[in-house]
Image (cartoon, helix red, strand yellow):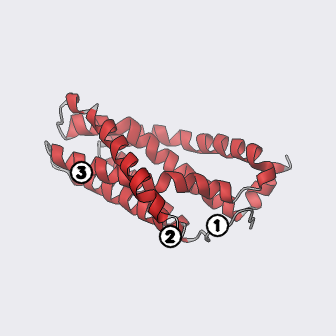
Amino acid sequence: RQLIPRVLKNRGIMKAVAVSVILYITNMISTNFFSLYVTQRLGISDQYLAVFPILNAAVMLVFMVGIQPRMNSVKFRLPLWCGLILYACAVTLLILIPAGSLGLVILYVFVWAAGGALVAPRKDALIQLNINPQERARINALIMASTIAFSSPFGYLAGWLSSLDRRLPFVFMLALFLAAMVIVGRIQEPKLGREE
């Protein structure tokens, strides 16, 4: 009872939670509808579905090991913003890919993985840097429960959109990424132990 009002009054945490919810929703949509989209709309053979996660993991590993250590001097928001832009570009590319274009799907996976390598660590750090260290465990649990609760209805919405047109869940994802960019633009550079 004492914790929830403090979280709701902390603008830094609320913005971080909003970004976290958006990324949770987009990841859920991508996980559930990407394979349906590439096989049923783009006509890509099922045998390639196992290749895409491997490629995604390999690209993320290269970015994490080769590029992330060189970005320590860069301001916090810039890589997060760049990652969201890459996510948006990847989804736009996926929507526009003509049927049977395996090479463009692979390009999508590459751009998506690059965006994920930039966004994932900073999304988690964004929450941690806005949390009071003495309440970190309880606030993290509250944020995770809230993220899952707020995200749940969007699975049904994405399924309904997919039943209308296989592209619509990804159009919805694009709108969510644009919303996340706006939120990140309103986030101040986080400082350890700082509460708004």
Q: Pointer 3: what residue?
A: 107
Q: Amino acid at mark 2?
A: Val
Q: Secondary structure at mark 2?
A: loop
Q: Amino acid at mark 3?
A: Leu
Asked if the residues shown at circle 2 and circle 1 are in contact, with their CB atoms under 8 angstroms apart, the answer is no
Q: Earlier in the sequence, mark 3 or mark 1?
A: 3
Q: Residues within 10 Å of mark 1 (few under 14, many from 20)?
A: some
Q: Nearer the viewer, mark 3 or mark 2?
A: 2
41 displayed left or right of 2 = left
Asked if the residues shown at circle 3 and circle 2 are in contact, with their CB atoms under 8 angstroms apart, the answer is no
Q: Secondary structure at mark 3?
A: helix
Q: Earlier in the sequence, mark 2 or mark 1?
A: 2
Spot occupied by residue 151 in the image (x, y as percentages of width and height): 55, 43
Q: Pointer 1: what residue?
A: 190
Q: Secondary structure at mark 1?
A: loop
Spot occupied by residue 91 in the image (x, y as percentages of width and height): 32, 53
- Residue occupying the point 71% across, 44% down: 142
Spot occupied by residue 70 in the image (x, y as percentages of width and height): 45, 63
In the rendered image, which quarter is residue 188 located in? Answer: bottom right
Q: Earlier in the sequence, mark 3 or mark 2?
A: 2
Decide: is 3 above or below 191: above
Q: Pointer 2: what residue?
A: 74
